[in-house]
Every structure is written in C-alpha cells, then in structure tokens.
Amino acid sequence: MTDQAIQISVVIPLYNEEESLPELCEWIARVMDENHYTYEVLFMDDGSKDRSWEVIQRLSRENANVRGISFVRNYGKTAALQTGFQAAKGNVVITMDADLQDSPDEIPELYNMIVNDRYDLISGWKKKRYDPITKTIPTKLFNAATRSISGVYLHDFNCGLKAYRREVVKNITIYGEMHRYIPVIAKWNGFAKIGEKVVQHRARKYGYTKFGLERFIFGFLDLLSIAFVNKFGRRPMHLFGSLGTLMFFLGSLIAVWLIGKKIYNIYNLLPYRNVTENPLFFLALVAIMVGSQLFLAGFLGELFVKQSVSKTGDYTVADKAGL
C-alpha cells in the first residue's frame, strides 16, 4: 500500500491498556472494512508496564494495517501524539483513546466532515459523560477558561476523539501537556476552519484512568505558555522591550524629579534632604535596573528566534512494529 493510498491514519496513544487493545483493533478494522477505507492504525505505547506492547506486536502480525511505536519510558500523551503525527501517512488523521471510551463508529462521519465539508479539524464533544463529579466539574471550568483565553469556542477541548486534515498535524508541534490545546495551536497556525461534533462517551470497560487532577493545573500552565508563545514567540522584544522601556523611563523620571526637587529647594533656601534618604530613589533605581534587564531579555529573545527550531521530538523509541 502506497502512502498516497492511505485515506485514514488512526493514532492511538496508550499506557497499560492490554485488555482493551484487541477489541479496539477489531472494532476499528470492522468499521474500516465496512466503509472500504484504506487505513493504518498507529498504536503509540507510552512506556507501558503491562503486556500492551506484546499485544500490539501480535496485532501487527495479524493485520498489516496495524503498526506501533513503543517508548522506553512514559513520556506522556502529548509526546505519544506528536510522534504519531510524525509517523502518520493518511490524508486524514484521527486520534482516539485506547480505553474503549471513544467509539470507532464515529470515524466515517469525522472523515466526511474533513474531506467533504473541508474542515481543518473536528473536535469531539462528549456532551454526556460517564465520569465522576470530581472530574466533570474541573473539566467544565477548564474548558471555560480555555475558551476565554484562546478565543476558540469548543465545548470539550479534552476529548481525545478528533480528526485532522493531514496538513494540520504535519505543521504543528506540541509538547508538555499541550495535546488538549491542539485546536488552539492549529488556529494560531492558520488552520482556522475548526468544527465540533457530538460524540458518544462510553463507560470504561477495562482498567482505570491514568490521569489525576494535577493534569488541569499543568494544562492551565501550558495554556498560558502557548498563549504567550503565540503572541510574542516571534517578537519577544515587543513584550520585554516595551516593559523594559516603560520601567526604565518611569525610574529615570522619578530619579530626575527627586534630584530636581532637591536643587529647587536649595536654590530657594527651603529645607531639603539628600536624595539617597528618600525611599522613592531606591525604587527608581530598582525600576531602572529591572527595565534594563527586561530590555536585554527581549534582545536576547530576538536572537534566539533567529535560530532554527527543530520539529523532531526528543523521545527515545525502544521498538517499532510494522514500520
């Protein structure tokens, strides 16, 4: 099968999901065969401690469309997706979780929305969730904050079931915990036609969730990071230079005012005190020094921007199957 002949790449990050993999693989294959799609399934084993990789190797031997990549340790979902995006050969890339909570039956409609409706990205919306309240409430707050900061109005940024046009995944880079913000990153990279589809959320059949509440804290910090990088990543001097110039100007203005006030009092035989005895003078010095440092930080940032940024992840691959 040639790379051009592959219509759909299904990228599935996983960690300790050996029980669900055979059922998920069979389900995906059935959907693909029923719709006569040419496809590949990329299982991204994120350093599993169970028999997940052995299962993936067996599935790859049984089905030539199944491939896998195994990391030497657990890097996180973002690393798995980024590596999967680099390896994907399909014209449409679909991501889903390996725990059977995402339904492969959604694939045909997601594919049609990308191909026929010409969307760049379709994000799943699990309108009805089978999650405990300790997870649903933080998720709602998280989604509201993301919409407010990013300007991308989706209901469910954290849904793992998404579909992408090939050009999207090949032209974005994600790291940290940024897999939740792929729609945001895509929009800021010029892929603005982003849609949403209500998808089925199924109860977990095997195992337990691998994510805790700390993901929302890390995720929010990553949101602030990408918001900053998007706005000032290519022009850091606009931020640091502006702040530095403002602080340097205010500090200098205060210092000149204090010195001028002392000279005025001396000339008019009025009581005065030394400039260094006034606390405002030291605040002015701090402002001048911080302003200079911020300006220098902006200048150094501009130099770093000129350097080429590698899009290859620093993730060590332990083994591959079918690739």
Image (cartoon, rainbow, N blue to C red):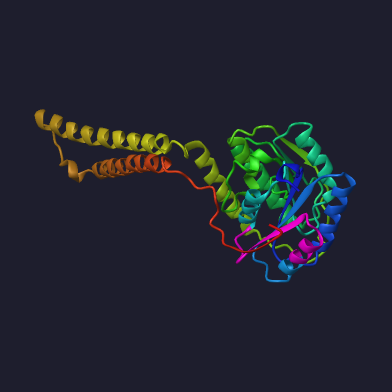
Q: How many marks?
A: 0
Q: Return the residue found at the far right.
A: 34
Q: State which quadrant residue 235 falls in.
A: top left
Q: Is residue 208 above or below residue 79?
A: below
Residue at (37%, 41%) from the top-left corner? 303
Foreground residue among 202 and 127: 202
Residue at (66%, 42%) from the top-left corner? 144
Foreground residue among 194 and 227: 194
Q: State which quadrant residue 119 falls in.
A: top right
Q: Return the residue found at the far front.
A: 2
The span picked out in magenta is 56-76
Residue at (56%, 59%) from the top-left corner? 315
Quadrant of the frame with the C terminus: bottom right
Task: Decide if residue 292 is on the left or right side of residue 310.
Answer: left
Q: Is residue 214 above or below residue 107?
A: below
Does residue 10 appear in the picture of this structure? yes
Task: Decide if residue 237 is on the left or right side of residue 75.
Answer: left
